[in-house]
Amino acid sequence: MPNLDVFRFEIGAWLEQNCPPEMREPVRDDGDVCWGGRKFKFKSEAQKLWLERCAAKGFTVPDWPKPYGGAGMNASEVKILREEMQRINARPPLSSFGIWMLGPALLKFGTEEQKLYYLNQIARGEIRWCQGYSEPGSGSDLVSLQTYGEDKGDHWVVNGQKIWTSYADQADWIFCLVRTDKTNKYQGISFLLFDMDSPGVTIKPILLISGNSPFCETFFDNVTVPKHQIVGELNRGWDVAKYLLGHEREMISGAGGGDRLNTIGAVAKRNGLEDPLLRAELAMFDVDALAFSALGEKFLDEIKVGKAHPAQPNMIKYAGTELNKRRHELLMAAGGSAALEWDSEGSNGGSKARTWLRTKANSIEGGTSEVMLNVISKRILDLPGA
Ligand SMILES: Cc1cc2nc3c(=O)[nH]c(=O)nc-3n(C[C@H](O)[C@H](O)[C@H](O)COP(=O)(O)OP(=O)(O)OC[C@H]3O[C@@H](n4cnc5c(N)ncnc54)[C@H](O)[C@@H]3O)c2cc1C
């Protein structure tokens, strides 16, 4: 057998043996997601076991090098692992901003000590991160941020406010953009890491229309941050921030993959909805969903051979999030009035309606669709005056 076939066979056999049956059930809501970290409470023994088994093999971050908690797999091997996991409907063992966002930035910009210290903890699900970028008045125009770190020799004293900090109340640490030079806009920002339990950090959850409070206002009042907790060079945090944003946008674009025609069509059929307009919309959606999946494959191939356009994540972020919003509009239309149920047991606590409302944020988080289109016009299409 060629090497990759042997690899697939071995991975498949390991998964069959080690993935608990409960971890092969579809994820119903956020409670089924394993986020890890000091404050995380496992929903079941199976969830804990699945994380531990995968972490021991490096499967939570298969493409990271082994010394940092990964499995050192190449792109083809990672693809096989994903396919084999999908084949048995295995849930991801661990979901985390550490894996999707901070990890790649540390791999590129971190010191060897930082990589060994933080990446291993991320891979084992021992540390949960939140992202301290946005501030009131500094969202799309992020570079105008005001949170300030005053140099005190061996540490900074940080003061300021962040907003929309997802899961700040559940995170252990924050990766945070802090101004360390007030005279230089772009080259006056540093990328700092610190513990959310540091004295002077206050968190206030924000209630959303979905009824949930997934993000917070985060205040820093004379927070001490030791100098060794900077990633990259002093005042060059913008380079780290932009690199991380590329990974964040790729992650969010993943929302584009999901229910296709068969599933949504079946929902409509169950509800006796044979409306030709709805059918036409479903067909158009399915063509776009296929195109999106082809775009994702193309992007991955280009990454493999080092030919991906640096602004590509903006394109897939825009396409994936707009597609996902359409998907949930259609699911609501196909679901009829029952889809609007908010609290009933049969509706699983209104999960359809709440998920639909949550998708409205897809085209805002990680950079809005308008801002993505600006970047695409300027950097990919090379349009004049954009
Ligand atoms: C679910 C969710 C989770 C989030 N999690 C985090 C997090 O964990 N950490 C974090 O730091 N931030 C987080 N954010 C914040 C997010 O990054 C910002 O909301 C986003 O960057 C937009 O910034 P803003 O909200 O200040 O809107 P603004 O920048 O004020 O934009 C308002 C409107 O103006 C438009 N606009 C702005 N500038 C331009 C322009 N140049 N051209 C055309 N139109 C423009 C925008 O598209 C938008 O429609 C989250 C947001 C959401 C919705």
Image (cartoon, helix red, strand yellow):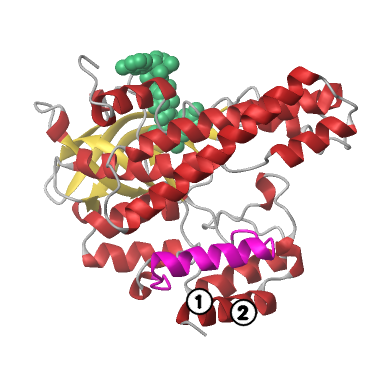
- For the residues labelled 1 and 2, the Cα–Cα distance comes to 10 Å
Q: Is residue 160 visible?
A: yes
Q: Is residue 109 above or below residue 76?
A: above
Q: Amino acid at mark 2?
A: Trp
What residue would you read off at disc 1? 57
N-terminal-most mark, 1 or 2 = 2
Q: Position of residue 335 (x, y in %)?
A: 81, 28
Q: Quadrant of residue 47?
A: bottom right
Disc 2 crowd, CA 10 A, few/some/many (<14, 14-19, 20+)? few
- Numbered tag placed on residue 235 in the rendering: none
**Ligand 1 within 8 angstroms of badge 1 C-beta:** no
At 51% from the left edge and 35% from the top edge, which residue is drawn?
A: 320
Look at the image and give the residue range highlighted in magenta.
Answer: 69-92
Q: Residue 364 placed where, x, y %? A: 47, 26
Label 2: state its secondary structure: helix
Q: Is residue 119 left or right of residue 354?
A: left
